[in-house]
Amino acid sequence: MNFDLDQDERELQRGIREICAGRFRLEEAAGFDRDLWRELADAGVFSLTVPESDGGLGLGMTEAVLVIEELGRALVPGPLVGTFLARRPDDVVGLSERGSSVLEHFDVLDELLVVDDDGLWRVEPGAVHAVPVDRPLDPLTPLHRIESLPQGERMGPADAAHMQAATLTAALSLGIAEATTDLAVAYAKEREQFGRPIGSFQAVKHLCADMLVRAEVTRAAVHAAGVLLDDDDGGDGEAHRAVHAAKLLATEAAVANGKTCIQVHGGMGFTWEATPHLFLKRAMVHATQFGGVDSHAEAMHAYL
Amino acid sequence: MDLLWSEDDERFRAELRAWMADALPRLPAESTREDWQARRHRDTTWQRMLHDAGYAGINWPVEFGGRGASLSEQLVFYEEITNAGAPNVGVNFVGLLHAGPTLIAEASDEQRSKHLPAILKGDEVWCQGFSEPSAGSDLASLRTRAVRDGDDYVITGQKIWTSFAQVSDYCELLVRTDPEAPKHKGITWLILPMDTPGVDVRPLKTVLGSSEFSELYLDEVRVPAVNRVGGENDGWRVAMVTFSFERGTSLVSEMVEARRQLDELVKVAKVVGRGRGTAWDDTGLRREIGHAAAELDALWNLVKRTVSEAARTGVPGVGASVVKLYYSELIQRIGDLALRVLDRASLSLDDVYDHSGHFVEERLRVLALTIAAGSSQIQRNIVAERILGLPK
């Protein structure tokens, strides 16, 4: 048992963080960026779990959550989970649950995957009747309204797709919980009122401490889900239980930290030009993807 | 990263299980909460059994008589003894997890050879004389005075929250030896034999209705200067060396026990009537229990993370404060849930049905966890200042 990140895993995270830092500035982000997408693909992000014999990196969900966590931290826009699970680095692939009333990033999709109780399905985006939403909650996640989705062509079983999608979405949320902690702490050190940094006041300190605690507990949960999905022999449901815990906690931590980050930023946090609202809004997007707090808390009961 | 126990860990687990299956039936029966002599007897008997089987001082270095187990073996140890219903450290808490490690780190060879083997064998029980009525979170403001007189210190003052004082042989005592120095610089760490004249133990009744703690009145108590550990006025540093132990390892068995408790709660919820069904049929309640289970799972993984990091870096990481803070608040929420499941039965500390009284007693007991060993408010300051680097 060694649940510490090893050298390779730390370097993998650092590498992705450097790509994002050098290439993507949130303040100037306009939405999906096909050039950045290609760079991520070239770096192996979308072929991480493709076997080496097929030109991929031959890694597992353990490494996937670490990579996706960094993309969440940088708030990279785009259908990351769908493209990752499709294992098709040259395309932009969306993933939606059947029955959803809206669809993210519809305009840029080369392909759409749909998951329901019976399986994972491939749908031609051209066959979907979708109406653009003028004012999406997250300005970096464009939306279309949809009535229903065509049945499509069956690609695989439902369960693995659900579990992996929930885990990767949890990893994105984890990244948000961490990034908002860093952002709030940096601001609390720099912003002065009453002649001292606001971070010297216990009321603000305790907000920041709670952000770190939520992020750390979530990090353990999400990393465990990745590790256990790789170890899963389908036996005792340990991996499923870990995925439910991870998605539940990551959802809550990202939303709570997003809100707290705005609170620590005070009036500036409520403006469009400051970045905290972008983190909260993305956290709210992820909260609705592949199960929210209620459904995952409910799902835990099967293992109790 | 991996979460698989190594072959060595599993072998260690199997041996421990086999030994416990044989040893536990030989243990004296559990006594009532208030029968302190019987509690001491049971806990020290268990300690002696652990010692004879080579499990005593699981985290202590081999050269001081400990097991010197790896951190992952320590997790296995706490997991197994708790799940088997074996006693927790009990009255040996201070000796094994605080005074002992302090002696290992700071004491003279004579002090070590006198006390360490006795602690490991269960022959010596220790208590802690740190807090005072006006020195709680601000421990360094303590005022119990020690004046040097020849080869002795003469000590007068009052200590509080001293667990196991009524059955202890020794006390790790913090005293003020220099009232003129800045508060952290005038403190000394002493070994106080509890049978010294002038030591008066007065049990303190807690919200549980029992005396988990005592007050310690010290009236011109003479302690030989050779009982000092570390230098005169260096006691604050000596005490801090092992504070991280108290925040880290001591919570591990608590947490294993909490997982067991939650499983018990689910069993109770499945039989307690509610409306036309059981409490478990109540979606809201069931989700909250599921939520708490998710949090406990995550926290247990954070313990594994913290332990693994410590094994790499050689120092206890930042995780201990985070775990302490989160766990102590989570276990209180689980206690609230238990009371909601029990409904009217939660009004009785005696069992209304199977084990119901235990849940009620636990709900009261865990009120202490957000106060003891650094209150949640102090923990948040520590997290903010030491981990996040926010200004004082």
Image (tube, helix red, strand yellow):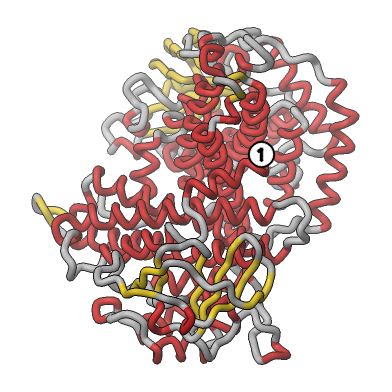
Q: Which residue in the structure is indicated by mark 1? A: A304
Chain of the residue displaying label 1: A
- Image position of A33 with respect to B127: above or below: below
Q: Please state the total of marks drawn on the protein image.
A: 1
Residue nearer the viewer, A57 or A211: A57
User: Does dot 1 land on a helix, a strand or a loop?
Assistant: loop
Q: On the rendered image, what quadrant is the N terminus of chain B found in?
A: bottom right
- Image position of B168 with respect to B254: above or below: above
Q: Position of residue B366 (x, y in %)?
A: 51, 26
Q: Residues within 10 Å of mark 1 (few under 14, many from 20)?
A: some
Q: Position of residue B122 (x, y in %)?
A: 73, 25
Q: Amino acid at mark 1?
A: Leu
Q: Residue at x 54, y 55 (%)?
A: A246
Please say whether residue B200 is visible from this viewpoint: no
Q: Residue at x 29, y 59 (%)?
A: A185
Is B125 on the left-hand or right-hand side of A95? right
Q: Quadrant of residue B153?
A: top left
Is B327 on the left-hand or right-hand side of B236? right
Q: Residue at x 61, y 18 (%)?
A: B358
Please say whether residue A63 is visible from this viewpoint: yes
- Image position of B172 with respect to A30: above or below: above
Q: Position of residue B90 (x, y in %)?
A: 65, 24
Is B339 on the left-hand or right-hand side of A196? right
Q: Residue at x 51, y 88 (%)?
A: A91
